[in-house]
Amino acid sequence: MTTQASPTEARLCIREMTIDDLSEVFHIGEEVFTAEYSPTLYRTWDEYEITTLFNSDNELCLVAEREGHIVGFALGTTVEKQRGPWKYGYLVWLGVRPIVQKGNVGQGLFRELRRRMHEQGVRMIIVDTATDNHAAISFFRKQGFSNPRQHVYLSLNLTRPRKK
Ligand SMILES: CC(C)(COP(=O)(O)OP(=O)(O)OC[C@H]1O[C@@H](n2cnc3c(N)ncnc32)[C@H](O)[C@@H]1OP(=O)(O)O)[C@@H](O)C(=O)NCCC(=O)NCCS
């Protein structure tokens, strides 16, 4: 199913990602998920991120297309805890070409993803991003997300001699 956006964004089409879209999505991801975006290895953008989610959750892998070009994408999945009754949606990657950012592309993608997750029985959507990614935090707040919690990452360099 595809969704035509409102008349003000007349040519924006949100649709499921197909195999032909993979390389374009990968390159947009390279533009937005740079080393600065993700200084830890916890979230690293690579081709496996796309293909894994594409294979497991095709209905939750969306692209935004305008005039035949992909301008953004959203890749999501769902998570069910063994002993919990709730199904969670996890928006893993959301990226919009820098040149069209702040033009409601991200919002269009998120709304369609939310609709699909809701249809799949999701009761809560979770997202994560770096604490200094103010654009994303502001974006997610605008979409209704709240209750942010911080997470600490530690690392151990195994190439350095160990302190006694
Ligand atoms: C976060 C991101 C997806 C937002 O996409 P977008 O298409 O630019 O966002 P939209 O135009 O739909 O913005 C919707 C609302 O989000 C907020 N917002 C978006 N970008 C913002 C920014 N740079 N600064 C402050 N608020 C912002 C605004 O409230 C905006 O509503 P408004 O235009 O009425 O003020 C985009 O900035 C991006 O690709 N960032 C790099 C990758 C990333 O951080 N992804 C998220 C984590 S996976």
Image: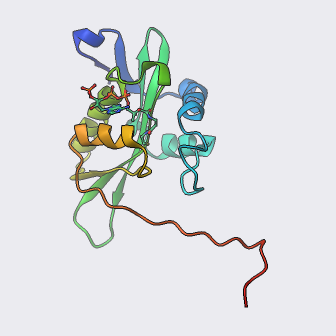
Q: How is the image coloured?
A: rainbow
Q: How many marks?
A: 0
Position above or below: 18 against 44: above
Question: Which percent across, then down, holds residue 117?
Answer: 28, 43
Q: Is residue 56 above or below residue 99?
A: below
Quadrant in which ligand 1 is drawn: top left
Residue positioned 60% across, 56% down in the render: 41
Left-right relation of 107 to 57: left
The correct choice, above or below, for 43 with respect to 64 in the image is below
The image shows residue 127 at horizontal and vertical percentages of 36, 50
The residue at the point 46 percent across, 21 percent down is: 71
Where is residue 144, by image quadrant? top left
Left or right relative to 82: residue 119:
left
Q: Residue at x 23, y 56 (%)?
A: 147
Point 38% across, 37% down: residue: 135
- Residue 128 % position (x, y): 39, 52
Q: Quadrant of the C terminus?
A: bottom right
**Quadrant of the drawing holding the N terminus:** top left
Q: Which x, y percent locates residue 40?
A: 57, 56
Most extreme residue toward the bottom, as rendered?
A: 164
